[in-house]
Amino acid sequence: MRISLEDVWHVYSPGTAFETVALRGVSLSVEPGEVLGIVGGTGSGKSTLAAHLNLLLRPTSGRVLVDGRDALALRKSELRRRVGLVFQFPEQALFAPSVEEDVAFAPRQMGLGPEAVEERTAAALGVLGIAHLARRPTRALSGGEQRRAAIAGTLAMRPQVLVLDEPTAGLDPFSRRELLGVVRRLREEGTSVVLVSHDLDEVAEVSDRLCVMEGGAVRAEGTPEEVFYGELALAPTTVRVAARVRESAPGLGRPVSYDETLRSLRALIGG
Amino acid sequence: MGPNGGGKSTLVRLLNGLLVPDSGEVAVAGHDPVTEPFEVRKRTGVLFQNPENGLVAPFVEDDVAFGLENLGVPREEMRRRVAEAIRSVGLSGYERREPHTLSGGEKQRVALAGLLAVEPEVLLLDEPTSMLDAPGRREVLRRIGGLRRSKTVLHVTHHLEELLEADRVLVINGGRLVAEVEPGRLMADAALLEENRLVPPTVPRLAADLGLGSCRTPEDLAGAVLRRVWEGSGAEIR
Ligand SMILES: Nc1ncnc2c1ncn2[C@@H]1O[C@H](COP(=O)(O)OP(=O)(O)OP(=O)(O)O)[C@@H](O)[C@H]1O
Ligand SMILES: Nc1ncnc2c1ncn2[C@@H]1O[C@H](COP(=O)(O)OP(=O)(O)OP(=O)(O)O)[C@@H](O)[C@H]1O
Ligand SMILES: [Mg+2]
Ligand SMILES: [Mg+2]
């Protein structure tokens, strides 16, 4: 499925002293089966944008389209099921007494039979590496464990579009890598993933396309290569190294991910 | 540092008396956090892993003032220190905002401002930069770097690059203290990193994978790469 935003504005607390214009005419689309990275500084509107993808927030003006149809015309429950959103603060997502029940909640809600619910729950817990925490009360988890439980809960819905808001904040480095592996696998299976993150290094690893937010507007958009090499101030560590080397060795190419960068630097040194 | 569920936040909670040890003793500046909570709390400031748990007041400015109020700081001085702390985290103009309406990084900055206003003797920071963008992260690290000359800082993080200037790194895994090392040694110890689900920062990792000596910044590494290229091609080494 394809989600597009057309000239979306979002104003919080309109007409009050706290009125905040969080989105200023954002237009973009999430294409089927792609990983779209959304980056940008603190308060630039990333979470607000993410919450529009399943209409958890409604645009103050502008439209959200799903496969060309106005998303407001879709049943809310259906939209929420097809577009799974994992919040920036995982605690907000965990409400069932145990991890297992929490992850099983959405599949059960979808009307699946007990076997299917169990199968999906076990699969999601396994993918996130928290099968051992299945029986644990959701209030008795470490920060990183909470994050993984929250992601598992959304994954169990098997959404067509998975929106992850800062999914690696609080994860240990191996878990961060494992999660990026999960994102790649989902893409291979045809799921679109929207990855909201302030960590450029990690966005560089998996994104097909990037959208850079600033002050509630899209400041730049394109492939990671275009965006990062177009504006080095936005670039992750790998690109900063490669760009510096390119000044003296323009043959290097424009690598972005860690592995690409390592490969091209090796090739340069080797020959 | 250490893997998720290793016990880092539990340690922080023991140090500030939120948890009571089943056995053993905890002392902060010589005081037991359980039997002398006031002595400990007036000397320590905590940033919780989830910044939402530290935000208690209706408005940002009250939240930042909270610690100072508890210490009985005079009004005028309090006002000055609160304004300065809010400014230093880049949130001037947010004084009358309600904390729950802030973005993730803004919440973390408010929590941090509360701590900076007080400048306690002991700072317990549980992943203080997890929601910050790169400039915010750099600024916080700079502030921590400045404070540590006169304060004790316990800084929990999953990013090894944030601890390069630390005196010591404690690695906690499975509830045990498994290592106590200098950051440079930790970074060079592949087995120790691997056992504890840690990864070195990108620049030293690339340098190691390329068989180049230790490098800190992207510029260092680019320079080392180019020197190697010039050596290989037999050209003059500049
Ligand atoms: N409920 C709300 N009421 C009023 N203003 C809000 C509300 N939620 C967010 N804002 C404001 O809208 C702007 C965008 O917030 P948003 O949460 O989308 O930022 P973000 O890019 O996700 O930032 P971060 O990286 O810090 O999470 C911020 O200035 C924030 O203060
Ligand atoms: N309230 C609780 N009741 C029972 N077990 C808990 C509770 N809080 C944490 N735990 C468990 O205690 C262990 C240590 O948790 P702690 O929060 O200290 O880990 P951490 O090192 O801070 O992890 P993270 O990096 O994920 O924040 C974990 O296995 C966790 O599941
Ligand atoms: Mg956000
Ligand atoms: Mg923790």
Image (cartoon, coloured by chain):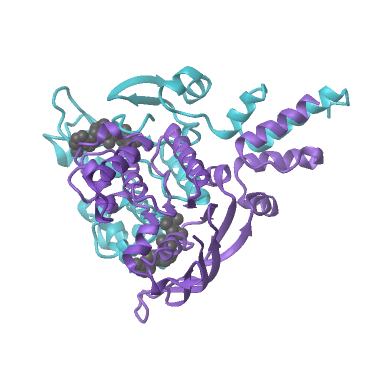
Chain colours: A purple, B cyan
Q: Quadrant of the N terminus of chain B?
A: top left
Q: Residue furthest bottom?
A: A15
| B133 on left or right of B80 | right
What residue do we see at 28% from left, 30% from top?
Answer: B7
Image location of residue A108, percent across then percent down: 24, 51
Task: Give coordinates of residue A144: x percent, y percent.
Answer: 34, 39
Image quarter hosting the C terminus of chain B: top right
- Image location of residue B94, percent across then percent down: 38, 66
Q: Dividing the image into four equal quarters, which quarter contains ligand 3?
A: bottom left
Q: Can residue B122 be seen in this snapshot?
A: no
Q: Residue at x 38, y 55 (%)?
A: A84
Q: Residue at x 34, y 38 (%)?
A: A123
Count the marks. Answer: 0
Q: Is residue A220 visible?
A: yes
Which residue: 21% across, 28% down?
B27
Residue furthest to the left in view is B35
Q: Estimate the x, y position of residue A58 in percent, counting from the top left.
A: 39, 72
Instruction: Compare residues B18 and B172 and report the one nearer the observer.
Output: B172
Q: Image height check: is A34 above or below A118?
A: below
In the image, is residue B164 above or below residue A56? Answer: above
Residue situated furthest right in the rendering: B235
To which quarter of the image does residue B76 belong?
bottom left
Q: Nearer the viewer, residue A215 or A66?
A: A66
Q: Is residue A90 above or below residue A261?
A: below
Give left or right: position of B141 versus B203: left
